Image: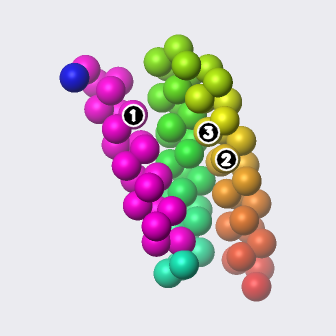
Amino acid sequence: MNRLTIFGLCAVTSMLVCYALENRSHWFILGFAVCCVLGSAYGFLQGAWPFGLVEGVWALVALRRWRNHARR
């Protein structure tokens, strides 16, 4: 395993953890958004631009959800 693979594994694993804990706090929604950005970076660095693009969109969706949830 090289550093890029480890980075991707950590990004996707932390994304899963934050997603699972979203109901506990709105900060996990923000954490999910940050992890999506990291997953997007991994996708582009790996050369899998469709994955990077989709993860970027998920990051925007999660940021919107966080903003709406934090306002309530």
Q: Are marks 3 and 2 in contact (CB under 8 Å)?
A: yes
| Crowd band around label 2 with a 10 angstrom C-alpha radius: few (<14), some (14–19), many (20+) | some
Helix, strand or loop status at disc 1: helix
**Screen quadrant of the N terminus:** top left
**Screen quadrant of the C terminus:** bottom right
Helix, strand or loop status at disc 2: helix
Residue topped by disc 3: 55
For badge 1, the amino acid type reads: Gly
| Crowd band around label 3 with a 10 angstrom C-alpha radius: few (<14), some (14–19), many (20+) | many
Q: Which mark is residue 8?
A: 1
Q: Are marks 1 and 3 in contact (CB under 8 Å)?
A: no
Q: Earlier in the sequence, mark 1 or mark 3?
A: 1
**Does residue 63 belong to the magenta stretch?**
no
- Above or below residue 23? Residue 9 is above
For badge 2, the amino acid type reads: Trp
- Above or below residue 25? Residue 29 is above
Q: Are marks 2 and 1 in contact (CB under 8 Å)?
A: no
The count of marks equals: 3
- The Cα–Cα distance between marks 2 and 1, rounded to whole angstroms, is 16 Å
Q: Residue at x 34, y 43 (%)?
A: 10
Q: Residue at x 29, y 32 (%)?
A: 6
Going by the picture, which residue comes out furthest to the top?
47
- In magenta, the rendered stretch is 2-22
What is the quadrant of residue 51 in the picture? top right
Residue topped by disc 2: 58
Left or right relative to 13: residue 65:
right
What is the quadrant of residue 53 in the picture? top right
